[in-house]
Image (cartoon, coloured by chain):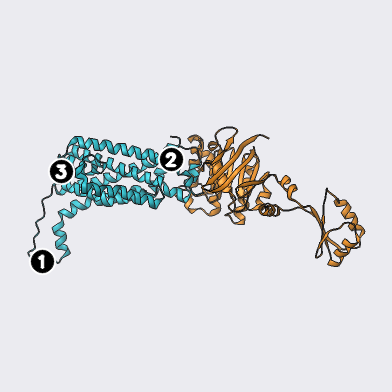
Chain colours: A cyan, B orange
Amino acid sequence: MRGFNVLLQKEFREAWRSRKFLWIPLVFALLGMSDPLTNYYMMDILNAVGNVPAGFEMLLPELMPVDLLQASIGQFQTIGLLVIMAAFAGAISKERANGMATLLYVRPISFAAYFLSKFTVLSVIGLVSITAGFTGSVYYTVILYGSFDVATLLASFCTYYVWLLFVLAVTLLMSAAFKTTIATAFTFIVIFVGQIIDALVGSFWTISPWKMPAYGVQLIRGTMEISDYWWSMLLTVVILLTCNVLGIWAMKKNAAMTKI
Amino acid sequence: MTTLLEVTGLTKQYAEKIVVDGIDFTLEENTSTALIGPNGAGKTTTLSMLTGLLKPTSGSVKMQKGEVRANIGFLPQYPQFHPWLSAIEFTEMAAKLNGVSAKNAKKDAQKTLEFVGLGNDLNKKIATFSGGMKQRLGISQAIVHKPKLLLLDEPVSALDPVGRREVLDLLKGLQQETTILYSTHILNDAEEMTDQLLFLRDGKLVEQGTLLEVRQRFDELHYVVEFSSEEEAKHFTDQYELKGKIKGCFVYIEIIDEKPSMQQLLRYLSNAPYKIRKVERQTASLEEIFMKVAKRI
């Protein structure tokens, strides 16, 4: 792991100065806030927009706090992940393509150190982002709808974080293995197509990394077979670690592709 | 002299195409070597293999003392930096990654940046640097850890004449302390700061040696005498036993085995009733030698 601390410092500087630590969490915070607020003020919004016939009444379902959290996670799962993947799909491939990696690859650093320094910083950005997202969602949900059990809420948060680490590991692996455009496309395919498959025919299996976000919500609802949760968690962590190992290998193998 | 680097049978092949074809050479300590060749000769591929960026198909690169990657500094033709870093941050990072202690890295980075003329721009973001400043920063990141071998890919080709002169002077200053191998197609530069020449053509090392050795192999030494008129030139070649080729007012007299000597020639000329404008001993420029090597089948 030669050079890890120095590379980690460099990655943190990059993320900080490119304001990734600011705008990505901000996106998640807005996504988190949007569902509790729009659901609560739906009637007001409709009235304010106008064109509502006199005497119009709409029966809105009575939402529980967990429903709002589920809706927020749904937002993270689409727009949130899209932002994360688009922001990081070029983390390695772009540096290779524009030649910035050359001045690092010629030094006696370990590729594991370089890959893991990037993964560490991405993980921290991910953590800050979902913290902002969950805070935004939970804050307005608690004010407008009611409270959560803190322990299960924390468990749900951690579960979603493990899923996000999985997404980041896949993104970074693709970036190490392919050029930016191909890496972006493959990451989208793995994550989003995986989600669609799981949504369509996922009832045939209970253990899958793509079930982790749903399991996070079910933890709060208490409607889940706990062994399925743990097996899915284990599988997610194993795949995540495998992605990191493959990513290091791919980064080393493709070092010659760096522009000189 | 002590050998620093030994390259044996270095080859790079992509499918059917051999880009570098079994080249052998050695680099002596504290010498400067120019890797010359036309475009596509394999210069950058050779440097890439020496840096370890590219794995050779066959052959070896051995450094006499220690591992290659830990003992080199490399400057690509168009160095790309992380633009959000300042010059001092980048150079300090380069030093640390090459094993300089955190305690010394900042000090060394500052000293090196001052050496390359960026002492007033230590804290400026690299994004604001001009081409010449980036090239100097490139040299600074390559030498900050005091490498035994400095590899430079076309170090001045992208610079304007002023930037080129500044960088060349810098490199000349480094010649005493480290071994330099640089690729170039600007032959005046090679002539200015080279102990050894390596001519690459179609991936093969077709000529190598000191500038003097290569010159001796390819030079057709001659004197050039410039007369005041073409008639005088013709008259000279008709009347005197020193025969030469006439081109207008110029007469080219070939030197074979150092004969005639300059004294002999001047004696002839001083006894003759001609108005002589100029007499000089001409040697082929590196460019002329390059053209000969490049065109040789």
Chain to which the residue tagged by mark 1 belongs: A
* Percent position of residue B257, x then y: 83, 48
What whole-number distance in Å separates the C-alpha atoms at marks 2 and 3?
A: 42 Å
Chain to which the residue tagged by mark 3 belongs: A
Disc 2 target residue: A7
Check the image and name the residue furthest to the left.
A55
Disc 3 target residue: A147
> Which amino acid type is shown beneath numbered disc 3?
Ser
Q: Do marks 1 and 2 share a subunit?
A: yes
Q: Nearer the viewer, residue B147 or A86?
A: A86
Q: Do marks 2 and 3 share a subunit?
A: yes
In the picture, measured across the screen, residue A42 lies left or right of residue A14, that is left
Q: Residue at x 22, y 53 (%)?
A: A34
> Which amino acid type is shown beneath numbered disc 1?
Pro
What whole-number distance in Å separates the C-alpha atoms at marks 3 and 1?
A: 35 Å
Labels 2, 3: front one: 2
Q: Nearer the viewer, residue B106 or A4?
A: A4
In the picture, measured across the screen, residue B274 lies left or right of residue A79, that is right
Question: Relative to residue B30, is residue A76 depicted above or below?
Answer: below
Disc 1 target residue: A53
* Percent position of residue A231, x then y: 24, 35
- Tell me the element at label 2: helix
Residue A170 appears in view:
yes
Q: Residues within 10 Å of mark 3 (few under 14, many from 20)?
A: some
> Which amino acid type is shown beneath numbered disc 2?
Leu
* Percent position of residue A110, x then y: 45, 37
